[in-house]
Image: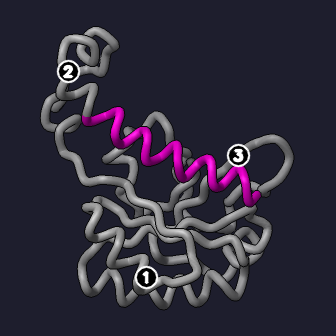
Amino acid sequence: MVTNDESNLSALFGDDYFLRILTMRECPEIGGADSVLVDLAGRPDQEAEQTLRASGCLLVPIPPDRLSIESGMSVVDEALELNQNVAVIAAMASEQDKEDLEGLFKGLPVFRVRRSTMPQSIIGKQQWSDRLFDEMPILKRSWTGIMNDISTIADWARRVS
């Protein structure tokens, strides 16, 4: 995942999965066999437009609060001008939140990534290990749900890209 200095997604997934860049000018070319997710953290600059056009699809995460939804609607409108394969991600959302977003974004796919603090609260500052995962069924259940949400989004992205 490529991200800029404004993003806090690495707090959720861990720094090991991120290549941090300070401006989009440093963004790698999209293409070839590599799969690149560019997180613009809501602040794309002018140089990002070419990257967005070249992308197979665009995912717009929208948390279910009023301000995020309002700004998300604007981002989706702009994204559709650059790329027709746009999906809305109901981020940290309940099933009802997802249904509400589906009503607002008719004609666009809306996916959900459920809200779960269970993995972070259980693991805390401990080192992640398979043993920890196997010993705690609640952790396994929570993490499996989140991974299923992400797999559904990845399947759609592969289909349309």
Which residue is located at x 67 percent, y 74 percent? Answer: 48
Q: CA distance from mark 3 to mark 1?
A: 24 Å
Image quarter hosting the C terminus: bottom right
- Nearest the camera: 88 or 37? 88
- Nearest the camera: 70 or 32? 70
Q: Which residue, given by chain and number where applicable, does mark 2 sit on?
A: 137
Which residue is located at x 68 percent, y 60 percent? Answer: 26
Magenta residues span 142-161
Q: Position of residue 148 (x, y in %)?
A: 43, 40
Q: Relative to 45, is 15 on the left or the right?
A: left
| Badge 3 or badge 2: first in the primary sequence | 3
| Badge 1 or badge 2: first in the primary sequence | 1
Q: Is residue 146 magenta?
A: yes
Q: CA distance from mark 3 to mark 2?
A: 32 Å
Pointer 1 local density, CA inside 10 Å: few below 14, some 14–19, many at least 20: some
Looking at the rendered structure, the kind of residue marked 1 is: Gly
Q: Which residue, given by chain and number where applicable, does mark 1 sit on?
A: 72
Element under disc 2? helix
- In this view, the mark in front (1 or 2): 2
Q: Relative to 103, is 74 on the left or the right?
A: right
Which residue is located at x 29 percent, y 59 percent? Answer: 92
Which residue is located at x 60 percent, y 80 percent? Answer: 45
| Badge 3 or badge 1: first in the primary sequence | 3
Q: In the figure, 139 relative to 70: above or below?
A: above
